[in-house]
Amino acid sequence: MARLLQIFNQYLASGGEEKFPVRIGELSDFQVRNCFFRSADWKGPKAPGIWKQAAWTLYNPASVATLRGIQAEYGADAWLVHNVFPVGSAGVYREALRRRIPIVYFINNFRPFSVNATLWVNGRVNDAALHGNPWPEILNASWQNSAVKSALLGAVLKTAWKLGWFDSIKAWVACSDFMRAKFIEAGVAEKSIFTLRYHYKPLPDVPPGGEGDFYFFIGRLVEEKGIRTLLEAWKILGKKAPRLVITGAGPLAGLCERAANEHVAYIGKVSEERKASLLATCRAVLAPSVWWEPLGIVPYEAYDNAKPVLAAAAGGLSESVLQGQTGLLHEPGNASQLAAQVLEMEADAGGRREMGRSGREWLLAAMDEAAWRAKFKSVVEFALG
């Protein structure tokens, strides 16, 4: 049985994809050991200086030493790599290349092409980085709100590409067909990139709770997630609107607080128990992203509770929200269309509930564990071969 070493640099702001590496260990037919780094280690008074961080983002000797120690003890046949920046460093790829260890790389965002990983520039998607031009992202100070840090990471990515470090990636794993197509467009060989969606473990039964009187948004409160579109839709709806409940944290938390009224409630970041209760009792879940969402876990959570989804037709969301079957899709940023779809769902409660039931059926079929295991095994074998 092949041994796999899973490498992941945890983000400052956690997202749904952070649960996926843990699931791989539970699902895989291979032996899997984890090596996780933390971006938080480079924050605060004890963090290394900015120039040392720049050098270590390219090659962090401490991270590489950790990998060497684990590799010597464990003897992994392949490495499963997610995010490595900044603490893990591009040195992960160099070390794998030096040791001739194949990497299976999970595409959770637009790195290693995009500096900020989202292609988000000046309030919109700019895909120049997919075509070799990182400057729009750099000039927009798109990574950690710093032009200097953005330029340094851009230089790190360019250097790693020129030195051939990314040649250590033998299999690329996209979380949606949309992302697969975008990476092929960026130059990844079609034969070496596979679609394998995040595996989500459905609840054994739909939780009790029925329907409350509100629509629910959960996620990071950032521009990319369409928060302004969401609030504008409820402004258009006015007194005709059911309640909107927003939970999450991020730079736009203040905007949500100011928008709160009798129809809009912002309740901040909540516990997992409170989140589960809200999912079980809402009428529908909202995912109005305005960037190219790679996949999105929110629809999975909605369907697990037999709730339909009102989502933007953005990136991979169009693959998990089936128009008119498990929810409704609107043009990204189109608040008027989203408002109209809320009224459409309100006018047909039976149809809304049927969409939720269909979503649950879709989730159970899509998350077939045996099928996921078989596909993952074939990807690993391709990389090893």
Image (tube, rainbow, N blue to C red):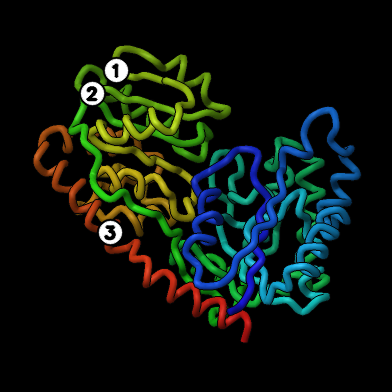
Query: Taking 1 as reference, is 53 left or right?
Result: right
Which quarter of the image is occupied by the N terminus?
A: bottom right
Secondary structure beneath label 2 = loop
Residue that extends furthest to the front in the rendered view of this protein: 73
Q: Residues within 10 Å of mark 1 (few under 14, many from 20)?
A: some
Q: Nearer the viewer, residue 286 or 358?
A: 358
Image vertical order of residue 378 relative to residue 262, above or below: below
Secondary structure beneath label 1 = loop
- Tell me the kind of residue under disc 1: His
Quadrant of the rendered image containing residue 373: bottom left
- Tell me the kind of residue under disc 3: Leu
> What residue sits right under mark 2 in the picture?
241
Gap between marks 1 and 2, in whole Å?
A: 7 Å
Where in the figure is residue 202, as x and y percent of width and height? Answer: 33, 52
Tag 2 near tag 3, CB within 8 Å: no
Where in the figure is residue 272, as x and y percent of width and height? Answer: 43, 33
Which quarter of the image is occupied by the C terminus?
A: bottom right
